[in-house]
Amino acid sequence: MELRIEKVNEKKAKPDYDNLTFGAHFTDHMFVMDYHEDEGWHDARIVPYAPLEMDPASIVFHYGQAVFEGLKAYPSSDHALLFRPDKNFQRLNTSNERMNIPPVDERFLVDALKQLVQLDQDWLPNQEGQSLYIRPFIIGTEAALSVKPAAQYKLMIILSPVGAYYTGGDQLSPVSIYVEDDFVRSVRGGVGFAKTAGNYAASLKAQMNAATYGYDQVLWLDAVEKRYIEEVGSMNIFFKINGEVYTPPLNGSILPGITRDSVIELIRYWGYTIREEPITVDEVIAAHQNGELEEVFGTGTAAVISPVGILKWKDEEITINENKAGKLALDLYDTITSIQTGSQTDSFGWTKHVPLVTEPKQP
Ligand code: COI
């Protein structure tokens, strides 16, 4: 498929990079591609960033046929680095399959993304802890009120220069977590493993409740027994107990995080025992009471590695590692961000290079 490029006439003013929050500013261009059941995916284009005009009857507005991804680009000398973009587009297709959205050409999209990042390269932040966040998404655009898969879709990729995901702290200040024992996020056979918008909409009520009680994030338990730990609002979760590292297995209701996968690979490479096994909240509390709970941290594209300092479960509130980032979380953060930014050799082959273009100087 051809990729058409239409550049902006005038670039937008850049935000204040010294006070960059998460996902509040968007670059000059966006990638768009349409699907029609008679034509397949077509008309791939990079165009000036602009609002969409959509039919109010578009299926996405009524029945939530929407999937998305999140990945990051980092500047590194004369190129930008994308972290495992192939995995994101692979997961997009997994989500597509579950949400009855037609599959996309993963390699074409990685190439198109490289061109988009290159075109908006002057938006790449270069301060510690910042990156260019990339949000690919697909929505059902057919105007129809019957409940059915749309016959038309739009795939878009937008870019946003970002700082730390959690507000009010630097990237490594520990977050506090409320273990939700009423609402559930997902159940096996549902859509928990898919990165679909409704999963996040359904989490908002619990997220707001947790904030009212003074906690940063919600930890979800399994929907059947409400004992087994699943994931945190925007992250997968890991526990270091007595020298071994535990994380819940991908059982169909948990998001298969790409940072989760990278962390597992690193931890194994460093010689730790990693157990992808069901773990209950009682086991975590008991480990804490025995003095064996050494560290808890979350992993995610937006959050990178986020230490957990406080865990609240029913009447119990435990403080982990004196509410400080633990050594394993710090080592993981350093190693992953060094690979992402190119300051450490990527012996895993995770990063993909985007050459940056140097504009010819005006005489
Ligand atoms: C990500 O980590 O990229 C996510 O998609 C999580 C969130 C911001 C919804």
Image (tube, helix red, strand yellow):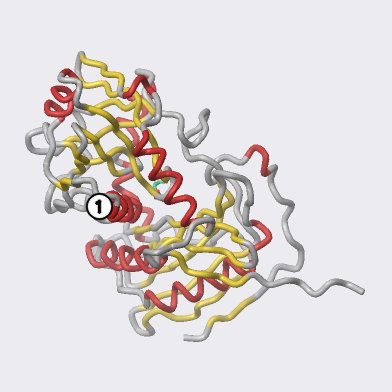
**Is the residue at mark 1 in contact range of ligand 1, meaning its CB lies under 8 Å from it?**
no
Q: Is residue 206 left or right of residue 127?
A: left
Seen from the viewer's position, the closer of residues 264 and 162 is: 264
Locate residue 196 relative to residue 124 in the image: left or right. Answer: left
Q: Which residue is nearer to you in this view: 281 or 53?
A: 281
Q: Quadrant of residue 358?
A: bottom right
Hey, which residue is sitting farthest right in the picture?
363
Q: Is residue 347 above or below residue 168?
A: below
What residue is drawn where x is 33% and y is 25%? 210
* Percent position of residue 158, x then y: 53, 60
Label 1: how many Cα within 10 Å (few below 14, some 14–19, many 20+): some
- Provide residue 290's location: percent of width, then percent of height: 15, 20
Does residue 59 appear left or right of residue 79 in this picture? left
* Label 1: element kind: helix
Q: Amino acid at mark 1?
A: Arg
The residue drawn where x is 37% and y is 72% is: 152
Residue located beneath label 1 in the image:
268
Residue 195 as seen in the image, left or right of residue 362: left
Residue nearest the observer in this picture, 153 or 196: 196
Residue 301 drawn at (x, y percent): 41, 50
